[in-house]
Image (cartoon, helix red, strand yellow):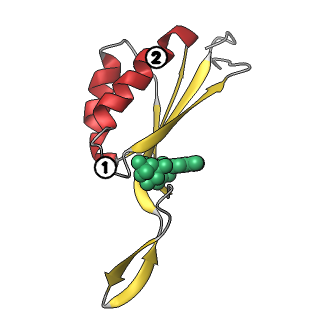
Amino acid sequence: MKLVTAFVRPEILQDVKTKLYAHDLFSMSITNVLGAGQQKGYTEAYRGVQTEVNLLKKLRLEIALPDEKVEVALQAISEAAKTGQAGDGVIFVQNIERSLRIRTGEPV
Ligand SMILES: Nc1ncnc2c1ncn2[C@@H]1O[C@H](COP(=O)(O)OP(=O)(O)OP(=O)(O)O)[C@@H](O)[C@H]1O
Ligand SMILES: [Mg+2]
């Protein structure tokens, strides 16, 4: 089992959900986060003052899924999230050592 964690633009949520549902991927967690990538800080005028802004609003999408679903999940997220511009996001894949559904005591 793997954990796919993606940081993406907030406005793609509906599209990414639709694309994941098409692959029977329904279980997920979504969190609003602030983040920065390799562009680091850029400056922008805020109330007339040049301010360092290096944390932008993003969504963190977490999906625990069987190994064989990883590729379709990466494809679905990428297709929904890609504009070709900086800030489209990143995806990380990790191993899950163990999982437990609390109601049943069985692995998720
Ligand atoms: N190495 C990282 N660790 C943790 N979170 C990251 C990392 N890189 C990016 N993120 C998260 O992903 C969001 C989007 O990153 P972003 O798409 O700007 O990545 P990037 O590496 O700068 O790529 P690009 O050059 O295409 O912009 C960030 O705001 C942050 O929340
Ligand atoms: Mg970036």
Q: Regarding mark 2 in the picture, which secondary structure is present there?
A: helix
Whether residue 51 is situated above or below residue 82 in the rendered picture: below
Q: Quadrant of residue 76?
A: top left
Residue 39: image location, x then y, percent? 46, 61
- Which residue matches tag 2? 71
> Residue 56: x, y in percent?
42, 61
Residues under labels 2 and 1: Cα distance? 23 Å
Residue at position x 36%, y 52% in the image = 86
The amino acid type, in three-letter code, at marker 2 is: Glu
The mark found on residue 85 in the picture is: 1
- Residue 104 lies, in percent from the top left, at 64, 11
Q: Is residue 37 visible?
A: yes
**Residue 7 in sight here:** no
Q: Quadrant of the C terminus?
A: top right
Of labels 2 and 1, earlier in sequence is 2
Quadrant of the rendering where the N terminus is positioned? top right
Q: Is mark 1 within 8 Å of ligand 1?
A: yes
Horizontally, residue 29 falls left or right of residue 17, namely right
Residue displayed at 33% across by 47% down: 10
> What secondary structure is found at the residue carrying circle 1?
loop
Q: Residues within 10 Å of mark 1 (few under 14, many from 20)?
A: few
